[in-house]
Image (spheres, grey):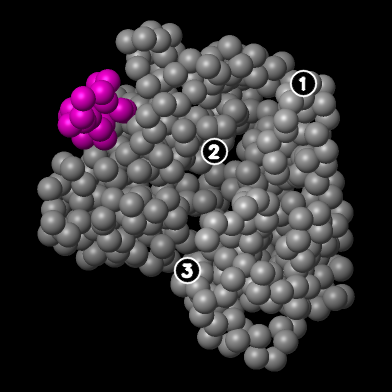
Amino acid sequence: MNLPLTGRTAEDLLAEVARMKEHDLPVRGGQVTAYVYDTGRAEVNDAAARAYFEMLEVNCLDPTAFPSVVEMERQVVGAVADVLGGGHGIFTSGGTESIMLAVKAARDLGGRSRPNLVVPVTAHPAFHKAAHYLGAEVVAVPVDLDTYRVRAADVEQAIDDDTILVVASAPSYPQGVIDPIEQVAAVASAAGVPCHVDACVGGWLLPWLRAAGAAIPPFDLSVHGVTSISCDLHKYGYAPKGASVVLFADPAMRRKAYFASAGWPGYTIINATVQSSRSAGPLGGAWATLQALGRQGYEELGRVTLEATTKLREGIAAIPGLRVLGEPESSLVAFTGDGIDVFVLADEARARGWFLQPQLSYAGIPANLHITVTGVMLAGVDAMLKVIADSAAAAAERGPVVLPDGLVELVAGLDLEALDDATFAELAASVGVDLRPGAGQPEMAMVNAVLDALPPAGREAVLVRFLSVIYGSGNSTSSHP
């Protein structure tokens, strides 16, 4: 893209935005079962959008310049702390940043020369990302392959003198089950190690499911040994992206998450988050969403979400060739196929207008499809089950993906760093994946089958090149000698 010579009208720009969004997944209505969260209440979305826009140009960099940021953040963080057992918090841009700050605080508090994190294999990759950025190692602990929960005894065995943080999930994203928080926190506390609960998905969901009658075990800062917890408001808080809160039981640990620098002659640098300048728009959107829904609104959303999840789980279990993984306490449901290729099923569902999120096999857990049930889905759960059943039947008829002989070995043996993007795009096209701009959404079963056959490091290398290709076209309009 070249910068236009003269400015364009708002009408012209919005028309082009609409064109660019033509092939996007819909963000409302419940047919997309990942990435977006929908209350089904237009008035709540409108209130959030208005508040977001009102705070759009306010900069969170300096709270003394914009006291509205302080007042609004205190209210948002206070509401989360009130529901999740107290604590002292920071409003962040999302779960990854909340986790990054929790790891930084633990690292700076621990003072270890070779710090490590003890995490279940089902813990979110944000912990691996935080460890990568912050110079820590990840010690991954297996989960029980019947329940998909980590065992406290395995966590205890993995802790050593360099462990700065123990992690448990409420729930873990892949199968929607809650780790035994009380037991894990107890072994962490006995070892003198902080314990973080990743409740990015569940923090603003589990309390409302409990109010609706679900059996939700203790998981928050009220649990002895839990020292921090992350909770995303742009998930089941239904706020606009990106809105999350990280709470610390001890204000001294929260201070370890901060960053200050006086080593230059410019303005004072003190950051509560990874970012410096950042719009207060997400804060405004989160504040307005919490206020617009209130406790009763969230309790009602919890009730209908629990009802939809129960109906979905029972419906999937009744479809021949499909089975739900584990017994999820939350509204995250994963199912696999017995004699049905779930990657083919996902393509069939996509062709019918529904997005089901593929998850690759890992650590003994089979490849599966993931559904995040939200408040809007109760009205459409029968339609979703029909699509899943029809797609499963079509996938059974098509049969599993058959990979060309030698393809996996070829990909595994490639030096991907030596390939330019054009050559990688040609390789993708050879298996039916056209990455050219405007080519549309390809069927992904073949891609997922190849990725599933590769070890994690191979998957990561392919995904990096995939991202490089789809963003690379058009990013540069000139070359320099």
Disc 1 and disc 3: Cα gap in Å?
54 Å
Circle 1: is it few (<14), some (14-19), or many (20+) Cα within 10 Å? few
Of labels 1 and 3, the one closer to you: 1
Q: Residue at x 20, y 29 (%)?
A: 264
Query: Compared with residue 180, is residue 240 higher up or lower down, i.e. above or below?
Result: above
Residue bearing mark 1: 10
Residue bearing mark 3: 145
Q: Position of residue 23 (x, y in %)?
A: 80, 46
Query: Compared with residue 86, is residue 117 higher up or lower down, i.e. above or below?
Result: below
* Element carrying mark 1: helix
Q: Are marks 2 and 1 in contact (CB under 8 Å)?
A: no
Q: Are marks 1 and 3 in contact (CB under 8 Å)?
A: no
Viewed as shown, does residue 168 lie left or right of 280? left
Of labels 2 and 3, the one closer to you: 3
Q: Amino acid at mark 2?
A: Ala
Q: Residue at x 25, y 23 (%)?
A: 266
Disc 2 and disc 3: Cα gap in Å?
23 Å
Q: Amino acid at mark 1?
A: Ala
Residue bearing mark 2: 214
Residue 46 visible in the snapshot: yes
Viewed as shown, does residue 346 lie left or right of 290? right
Viewed as shown, does residue 454 lie left or right of 81? right
Q: In the image, which residues are magenta?
A: 250-272
